[in-house]
Image (cartoon, rainbow, N blue to C red):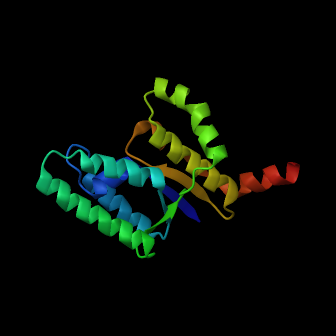
Amino acid sequence: MNVRFIDTSVMTNMLEIPGRCKDVKSVQEELKKVIEAKEVLILPIATIIETGNHIAHIDNGNIRRTIAQKFGEYLRKTAEGEAPWQLYGVELDKEGLLYLADHIEENAIREIGIGDVSIIRAYEQYRDTVPGIGRIMIWSTDTHLQGYCEENVSVTVNRRRKRS
């Protein structure tokens, strides 16, 4: 099973948000390939929140409304299980909040926002708890997130468990 976490940069291209959609064609082509390959697509809650914020800051009210309607449909389809992706990472518990607190400073220095840190956290949780993963990655047009890609994940997880 191959798994991709959808980053905000990919979602803003899917929705064609002005000023945030320079990779529309490549994202659309990649999405078709991912769906055909039946990869698991994960939509983290941070991607939803960040994308909604980007939509709210579109200058043109007509475009803002149109894109908000389209995003609303994406969210409805996600809730109904009709989207090509599934929601993940809805809760922020004490452990998750401490993770964000522990990583905020180092990432802020590197100009990486809390939304991206949250997506990284969800990626790591999924990787460490879901069996049967072959490859897992964060699908992003942002360079600092593109390095999150691991092959043969279940083999690594199984080895860790045997040693414990």
| Residue toward you, 62 or 138 | 62
Q: Please state the horizontal and vertical placement of residue 40, each as a whole percent of the image.
A: 51, 65
Tell me which residue sits at (31%, 65%) in the image: 72
Q: Nearer the viewer, residue 147 or 51?
A: 51
Residue 31: percent from the left, percent from the top?
37, 62
Q: How many marks?
A: 0
**Residue 74 visible, this angle:** yes
Q: Is residue 102 left or right of residue 14?
A: right
- Location of residue 39 with respect to 17 vertically, above or below: below
Taking the image as shown, residue 89 lies to the left or right of residue 51, namely right
Please give the name of the residue rendered at 50% of the width and 57% of the height, measured from the top-left corner: 4
Image x and y of residue 149, in percent = 55, 47
Q: Is residue 26 visible?
A: no
Q: Quadrant of residue 120?
A: top right
Q: From the top left corner, tell me how far across and down residue 46 is, in percent.
A: 45, 50
Q: Residue furthest top?
A: 109
Above-or-below relation of 49 to 66: above
Q: Is residue 12 left or right of residue 164?
A: left
Q: Residue at x 49, y 55 (%)?
A: 5
Q: Is residue 39 above or below residue 99?
A: below
Judging depth in this view, the residue of 152 and 24 nearest the camera is 24
Where is the N terminus found, in terms of image quarters? bottom right
Left or right: residue 83 versus residue 101 is: left
